[in-house]
Image: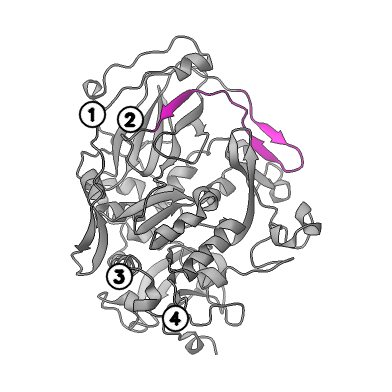
Amino acid sequence: MLRAAVAGIGLGALGGAAYGADRMLSGGSPAARTAARPTRLAHRPLRSTEVSDRTLPSGVVVRSAAWVEEENARNGTSAWFLGAPTHLLGFADRTSATEGDTVTLYVDSPSAPFHMEAYRMGWYGGRGGRLVWRSATVAPTPQPPHQLVPGSNMVQCPWTPSLTVAVTNQWPPGLYLLKLVAPGAQGYVPLCVRDDASTAAYVVMSAVTTWQAYNTYGGYSLYTSPSGAAGRSRAVSFDRPYVHPYVENDFFGNELPLVLLAERYGLDVTYITSIDLHQRVQDLAHHRCLFSLGHDEYWSSTMRFGTQQAVTGGLNVGFLGANACYRHIRLQPSPLGPDRQQVCYKDRFMTEDPMWGKDPAAVTANWPDGPDPRPEQALVGQQYSDVAGNADVVVADPSAWLWQGTGVHAGQHLPKALQGEYDHYEPGLSPPTNVQIVAHSPVLNRGPGRVSDMTYYTESGGGGVFASGNAAFVAELSDAPLIQAAQPAPVAGVTPVFLRMMDNILSVFGAGPASATHPSVPNWQQFYS
């Protein structure tokens, strides 16, 4: 997993006059805390519905939405950034919300009052966010210890509510960081505000199932435990905070650069989480393109096969990272709502998962493994290879439309552009067989014979699928020095090339089914004889 280096930056002062005076809540009961009167910002008019074609400076045409352009013309701020490691922890009762929903926050602030500031993440002149809402001050809210569920080693937090937030039309759709602020302590709660009626050309998905898999709050994740990997969780719960600084690092490095690009261009875009894809996969039929970002490893059957069906129907998909759709999960309810517990036994050789003897297709082994192997290559166009790559990306087919306008040539090296997880095309493993390899990069630091591929294929009469095969691809789209502390720095000789490639992807994938205009030209046999 690629993680951005997070360094401190100075935060702009939050002027009290702009937000009104906080009102301290008396008492610490849930009823009293929920009764907080938020400080309201200026009324935001209803969003424009105008959508049109826009020509970028590169000369390519993308789908643009007036409301996104208008939103990003508003005043931004860097005050969303924490600036220093702090440990005010909390979580929300949902990963996403839509207008009319009420979001409940659970915060552990045992001895100090706190408040919450809601920042929508976007371009905003390079500042990265806009303050949309701020709560009143909430009295100290101590919470009980977390619980460990025997058998699954799942950590869950039976906490009491700290405050509720009404999502109104003042909250434009987008990805939000809810910043928790107390004297000497800060923290984040991530939230997606979605638009279920959207027909936007582009859908950007935040990989919260992967975030939760790696979350070690309470000492356990799907990878580790206080006693090592053998005692790891077999299920993880969204009813617990993320351990600082996980959300910041994974979101900033693996997702935020693409969000900033979309907002900077004023794209006709909407946002979802991987939980939303599971719950509303049928909505893909209303869009032209889905973007999976830097590390999108954990997929349910509904996510996987619903997306494959959508590609057959004309949806284009950009897998912009690596290791996507590798772990098979099941989702089940928690006391706070549906799909709040994520089951993944990673059961390759043993029979821990109770579905082994009941429903082999539901067993949460890795997708390529038994008892019912279904390699992710059938959707992504390539397979997970390895981790800890450190190599150049090597151009294989400069005639491919993806490289148009970049000026690259066959055999050109993009220095050290491949970092972290990487994937490759595996002939004979599974469809598709019409794969076009546009980069073929030896990963020598991991031993002989290892490669990473950048691939493209089209479904006959349907959509196109691009896969970067490189966990660092999204991070290397970063060219925003004003918020560089929250992002990787631009990479000389790499970032401009990848940004131009993204222009091409946005243009083709935003126009409709790519098989009709840019069918793949299979060439994999040149590299795998």
Mark 2 element type: strand
**At x 24% / y 34%, what residue is drawn?**
44
Any part of residue 292 in sight: no
Mark 3 crowd level (few <14, some 14–19, many ≥20, 10 Å Cα): many
**For discs 2 and 1, the disc positioned in front in the rendered view:** 1
Distance of label 2 from label 4 (alpha carbons): 47 Å
Distance of label 1 from label 4 (alpha carbons): 51 Å
User: Callout 4, which amino acid?
Assistant: Gln
- Spot the residue most to the top: 26
Check the picture and name the quadrant holding the C terminus: bottom right
Distance of label 4 from label 3 (alpha carbons): 16 Å
**At x 46% / y 66%, what residue is drawn?**
470
**At x 50% / y 56%, what residue is drawn?**
282
Check disc 3 and report the residue beneath it.
504
Asked if disc 4 and disc 3 are in contact, CB closer than 8 Å, the reply is: no
Query: What's the magenta region?
Result: 144-167
**Which image quarter: residue 407?**
bottom left
User: Callout 3, which amino acid?
Assistant: Asn
**For discs 1 and 4, the disc positioned in front in the rendered view:** 1
Residue 133 marker: 2
